[in-house]
Amino acid sequence: MEESSDPTAGRISERVRAIEPQQIRVLFDLAAEAEAGSDRDLVHMELGEPDFDTPEHVVEAASEAARAGRTNYTPNAGIPELRGAIADRHAEGSEQSVDSSTERERPDAPGPERERLVDPDTEVVVTTGGVEAIYLALLAAADPGEEVVVPTPAWPNPISGARLAGADPVEVPMPAERGFEPDPDRIVDAIGPDTAVVTLTSPSNPTGRVVSPDAVQRVVAAAADHDAYVLADEVYRELTYGETPPRVADLADPGEREWVLSVGSVSKTYAMTGWRVGWLVGPADVCGQVTKIRESTTSCVNTPAQYAALAALTGPQAPVQEMKAAFGERREYVLDRIDAIPGVSCPRPEGTFYVFVDVSALDGPSMDVAKRLLADYDLVAAPGSAFGAGGEGYLRFSFANSPDRLEAGFDRFEAMVRAELDEG
Ligand SMILES: Cc1ncc(COP(=O)(O)O)c(C=O)c1O
């Protein structure tokens, strides 16, 4: 039989057909096509990963684990040492904000004062990156036909993950006129009897905005009131430029904490995107179900990579501070450059390594603007339309790139804007 080129032909499930390829990937592929067999020198600012190397001691830990024969399957929920390190990381900074009624005695806690707020045996699952934690949490928490509330602009995975789970994503645009500051009124208004999950990504990819403590508390309270989970994506939490914000779980009232599912990852914090280690922390019933369904996905995370993540969490933290300092300097440089370009602007990111730039003064949808930037100026940026409702009219630039490349990239962006707005 002749193969059909129609992607909707054949017995492809509706759930899968409902997923569109991510627009960031579309740009990435166009850039790869432009580079193939040519000597074009593209500046890449579409990428969502640090440009630093994984710290040496982390690489060493993985290598040692593999040499020592730690190459077998692990428990589905991950090696106990890593789950313990994740539980400890979750307890850091939590002490003052957690009511004593939620503290639990654990005889194996590391140190007389520290009591683990998270039980590593039942409340932590190690996953294949934050990506898998988000998808499996949605799969475990949302039934087909139920709603997943996603404040936007947002990294697209919670939206596609909800669709894959058969649930309906409800995109709630945050106010562009207030720099996309997460607005609890809008989020709370979107929560109703059909809501299964509300996502809160703080800091946000693509806007870099942090959800304020007051907004977190109002959203968690409204979600708990409707027996809905708050899926708190905190993979960029440690890449914030002011004080590290409190965790969503720590801001929740003790009685509402059971409705918070926290997602973390070593990807961004430790420059470990390719190692694929993340986690879900949440109530034992959800983590138990997620552990069960991991049997049907990946069984466990790559074993040496789990030892690498353990070394990252428990070893020296200086590489993180160095990377953060570099991102901080680049953020200032990028904000100055954007400030000096007429007709464009962006909210000041509080965390992450992205700026989300308003290019609505330029002609056409953001995908067209991104394509022109690539075709005529050799600069690759992500179109705002990739990030759901409210993202149109913007471009996301990643400043996870060397100072030289950032300078070249913003020279090109400035040249395009000036040419198109006739500000030459
Ligand atoms: C907001 C957000 N959450 C989660 C992830 C997942 O990252 P990973 O699967 O590498 O942990 C990403 C990756 O880009 C992200 O931007």
Image (cartoon, rainbow, N blue to C red):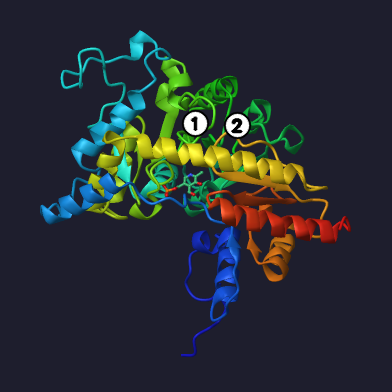
Q: Residue furthest front?
A: 404
Asked whether the residues under the numbered discs 1 and 2 touch, taking CB atoms below 8 Å apart as contact, a structural biologist would say: yes
Residue position for label 1: 228
Q: Is residue 392 above or below residue 141?
A: below
Q: Secondary structure at mark 2?
A: loop
Q: Residue furthest left?
A: 68
Give the residue displayed 64% in from the left and 43% down from the top: 333
Q: Is residue 67 above or below residue 278?
A: below
* Residue 373 located left or right of residue 143: right
Residue position for label 2: 191
Give the residue displayed 16% in from the left and 18% down from the top: 107
Closest to the observer: 176 or 45?
45
Q: Residues within 10 Å of mark 1 (few under 14, many from 20)?
A: many
Closest to the observer: 90 or 170?
90
User: How far from the left and from the top, in percent, is residue 424?
Assistant: 86, 58
Disc 1 CB within 8 Å of nearest ligand 1 atom = no
Q: Residue furthest top?
A: 100
Q: Residue furthest bottom?
A: 1
Q: Residues within 10 Å of mark 2 (few under 14, many from 20)?
A: many
Give the residue displayed 41% in from the left and 42% down from the top: 137
- Spatial CA distance of label 1 from label 2 is 9 Å
Q: Can residue 125 be seen from the camera position used here?
A: yes
The image's mark for residue 38 is none
Pointer 1 or 2: first along the chain: 2
* Residue type of the residue flagged with mark 2: Ile
* Residue type of the residue flagged with mark 1: Ala
Q: Secondary structure at mark 1?
A: loop
Q: Quadrant of residue 123?
A: top left
User: How far from the left and from the top, in percent, is residue 406?
Assistant: 61, 53
* Residue 410 located left or right of residue 252: right
Q: Is residue 19 above or below residue 55?
A: below
